[in-house]
Image (cartoon, rainbow, N blue to C red):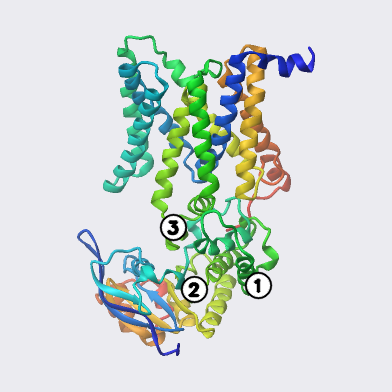
Amino acid sequence: MTPDQNIISFSGVTVRYGKLTALQDISLEIPCGSSTAILGGNGAGKSTLLRAVMGWQRLSGGEIRIGDAHPQHARPRLSYVPQRHSVDWDFPITVRGVVEQGRYPSLGFLRGLSRADHARVDAAMEELGISQLGGRQIRMLSGGQQQRVFLARAVAQGGDIFLLDEPFAGLDLFGCEELTHILRGWADQGRTVLAAVHDLAIARSCFSRGVLLNTGLVAEGPVGEVLSAANVDLAYRGGRCVHTGMPKAAGIDGVLP
Amino acid sequence: MSLHDLVLSPFSYEFMRRGLLSAVLLGTSGGLIGCVLVLRRMALMGDALSHSLLPGVAAAWFFFGTSTTALFFGGLAAGLLTALGSALLSRLTRVKEDAAFGSLFIVFFGAGVALVSKLPTRINLTDFLFGNVLGVSAGELRLAAAVCFVTVAVFVIFYRSVLLETFDPVFNRATGGRGGLVHLGFLTLTVLNLVAAMQTMGIVLALGLFLLPAVSAYLWCDRFITMLLLSVAFAVADSVVGILVSFHAGLASGAAIVLCLGAVFVFSALFSPRHGAIGAVRIGAARRPPA
C-alpha cells in the first residue's frame, strides 16, 4: 500500500434520523496512513460519521467503502477507541484484562487466548508503555494512562485503521501531549487514524488532515487549510456573524490565524 | 449442644434438605446474575422486575391452580412483558428506561394485587413476597436445578460476551458483538431466576440472594471472574448458615438467609481494605485519584 492510496471513501453519504438530517451528501477520500481529525460543532455529525465507518449506522443514501469492502466486511481492519467516560472505571478488571478484550472478536466461545494472542497483548502493552501496569485495577491509573489502556486494546485488535471518539476529552495538558505523540507515531507507522475532535488547537497540532462538518461537508484536506478563518466561521457560526462583534467562543478565537 | 446437633441433625428432615438444596442452587445462579445487575447499575431494575411477576403468577393460579409449571410460565410471561415493554417504551417515547420500568412494574403489581384479592383460594400475598424455603416441593426443586444449570452454562459459554457487554457495550458493538441480544438474554435469565426463586425465597428476598453477595464480592475483588466466584461462594455459604439459623432460632428462613448475607455485606462495606469505608477514612484522602 502506498501512502497516497485512499483507504476509506465516502460517496454521497447521507444519514437521517427521522426528519432530522445528521449528515448531508458527504463525499471525500481518506488517504491510507493519514491522520485525520473530524471537526465540527455539536450535532455537526462527527459521531455519526464515525458510526457510519464502523458500519453500525444505516445510511439513508450514498456509500462507504473501506478498501474494496463494505464497512461490515472490513471489521477486522477497524480498531475502535470509545470515549473514556463511556465505561465504569471501578469495574473489577485489570489493565491486562482490558487489553485482552482486543483479542475477543477473533476467539470462539470457549477457546481461551492462545500463545499468539498473549504475545499480541504483550506487544500492545509494550508499545503503549503500560507493561508495568498490567496487574493494576483500572481506577488506579491517571487519565492519560487510562487512555493508553484503551489505545493498547485497539492495537491488540490488530487492525490498521483506528477510529477514535473524542480521544482528547477530559485529558490534562500532559495527557494531551502524550496522546498527540502516540497518534503521530501511528501515522508514521502507516496506520490510518480517524478521530472525532472538538478542540481545534489540538487538531492543528496533532493531525495532518481535517474534515470539517456542519451536517454537510464544509471543507476537507490539510488541516491548516481546512481550519481557515472563513471555514471555521462557516462551520461553527453558520457564516452568520463574521466581523459583527458578536460574542465569540473563546476556544475558537484562540486558534484562528 | 454438639456440633452434630447444631449443623448435621437439622438436615435429617426431608424439608430441610430440600430447602437447603434449593437455596444453594438459587444462590449459585443468583450470585452470578447479581454481579451483572450490580455492575450494570440495574439493581433497582431487578427489584422492579421482581414485583412485576405478581399478575402472571396470580393469573396462572387462577386458571391452572398450584401447578409449578403454570406458575412458572405465568411469572415468566409477566416479567418478560415488563422488560420488553419498558425497553420499547424507552426507545419509542422520550421516557427514559428507569422511569419506563418504574411505571410499568407498578401497574403490573397493582394488577397482581387486584387479581389476588379476587382469587377464590387463599393464596397469600406474603407467601409470594417472602416465600418459604422450608415448603419447597419436589417440582420446585427440579425447577431451581434446571434454572441453575442454564444460568451457569450461559455464564460459562458466553463469559466473554457477558464481560464485554457489562464493561463496555460500545466496544462490544464496535467489534461485532450482538449487544442487544446479550442484554435481552440477560433479562430473560434474570426473570427465570426470579420465578424459580419465588416460592423458595419470595420475590423481595430473592433479590437479596442475588444482589447482596454480588455487592459484597464487588467490595473485595479487582477481577470479574473472582467477583463471580466469590459472589457465588457468599450466596451458597450464607444460604447454609441462614437455613441453620432459621431452624434453631425459629426465624423465617428467607429472612434469615438475607440477614446473614446482610451481615457479610456490612462487614465488607466497613472492613474491605481497599474499597471499604474504614480503609478510605484511614487513608484520610478521597478514595480515588482524580479521573
Say whether residue B107 is left or right of residue B20: left
**Badge 1: few (under 14), some or many (20 or more) residues near its Cα, within 10 Å?**
few
Whether the residues at callouts 1 and 2 have beta carbons within 8 Å, the answer is: no
Tell me where residue B186 appears, x and y as whole percent: 45, 43
Tell me where residue A116 appears, x and y as whole percent: 62, 69
Q: Quadrant of the C terminus of chain A?
A: bottom left
Tell me where residue A172 appears, x and y as whole percent: 56, 68
Q: What chain is tagged by disc 1?
A: A
Q: Name the residue beneath numbered marker 3.
A: B177
Q: Quadrant of the N terminus of chain A?
A: bottom left
Residue in front for this viewpoint, A146 or B288: A146
Q: Nearer the viewer, mark 3 or mark 1?
A: 3
Q: Name the residue beneath numbered marker 1.
A: A126
**Badge 2: few (under 14), some or many (20 or more) residues near its Cα, within 10 Å?**
some
**Badge 3: few (under 14), some or many (20 or more) residues near its Cα, within 10 Å?**
some
Tell me where residue B120 appears, x and y as whole percent: 32, 9
Q: Secondary structure at mark 2?
A: loop
